[in-house]
Each structure stands twice: as structure tokens, then as C-alpha cells.
Image (cartoon, rainbow, N blue to C red):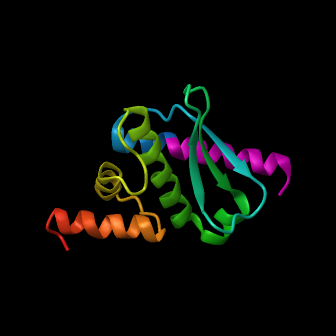
Amino acid sequence: MKKSELETERLRLLSLANDLAREHWDVDYTGTLVLRDYEWRHQWAAFAWSNDGIKVEIRMSAPTNVKLGPELTRGNLLHELVHWRLWSQGVPCDDRDETFIAECLRVGAPLSHDRYAQKAYEEYMRKVGAA
């Protein structure tokens, strides 16, 4: 992918992130979005921050996004936005935290396929009486 194409796609995803943040929380996304030009094999996207709050970013892979398609890419972006939103409010935001699971379910974001996250989801569903 050419640099100009990568930047165009990054800006499109950043715009989508703002649209999704406004739709679900009535706020703008305040972090950055990093789009890599190499395929990720073990994860589809990531949310990262520095302890001082200076670096706050969603990271994605252009080749991985192409393989996944628009719907899964949108879902992954929303999943990472849930991390960002909870983190920005000082709320626990790990894939295994109840607050994270509840917010993903509320906004329709997919949950991690990690076995520990899936176990936390099953426990959460038992706790709320839905499983």
C-alpha cells in the first residue's frame, strides 16, 4: 500500500472513530490512530496509552483490515474505542473487566476471542443471569 493510500485510510478510520464515539458516548475521540502497513497475526487491533496520558492511540493493520473486511474492521475499531472511553474515564478497561464487557455489550462491540476474555464474559453472563 502506498503511503498516500495508507494515510487516506488512516484518516477514514479516524473519522469513523469520531462518528462512533459521538454515536455511543456523545464525545469526540481524543486519541490518535496508527495504521501499520504489515499484517498482524495474533491480534486485530490494539488500544495503547502511556501512563502520563500523552500517548493515547488505537493501532490497526491495513493488511489485516483488508482481510477482515469492513464489518469486522468497524467492530474492532468500536472494541478499541470502548477501551479508550473507559480508560479516559478512569474505569477498568481490560478485556476481562466487567465494566468493559458490559460496555461492549451495550454498544454492540465484539469481545476479544482470547480464552481469558471469553471466560470472563461467561462469568459475567452467569452473574447477570443471562447465561
Residue 98 vs 129, above or below: the answer is: above
Residue at screen point 75% across, 44% down:
7
**17 to 121, vertically: above or below:** above
Image coords of residue 108 (percent x, y): 35, 59
Q: In this view, does 45 lie to the left or right of 112?
A: right
Name the foreground residue: 52 vs 60: 52
Q: Quadrant of residue 127?
A: bottom left
Please identify the residue farthest to the right as the structure is shown: 2
89 vs 2: above or below: above
Residue 70: x, y in percent?
Answer: 57, 64
Q: Residue furthest bottom?
A: 131
Quarter of the figure that contains the C terminus:
bottom left
Q: Is residue 55 left or right of residue 121?
A: right
Where's the N terminus, which quadrant? bottom right
Reply yes or no: does residue 7 show up in magenta: yes
- Magenta segment's dominant SS is helix
**The residue stretch that appears in magenta:** 1-17
Q: Position of residue 92 (x, y in %)?
A: 37, 43
Between 56 and 127, the residue placed more toward the observer is 127
Q: In this view, does 50 lie to the left or right of 28?
A: right
Could you say which is closer to the camera, residue 120 or residue 112? 120
Residue 53, by quadrant, is top right
Height in image: 50 above or below 15? above
> In the displayed structure, does residue 24 sit left or right of residue 53?
left
Q: Residue at x 46, y 33 (%)?
A: 28
Of all residues, the one furthest to the left in this rendering is 129
Q: Position of residue 91 (x, y in %)?
A: 35, 38
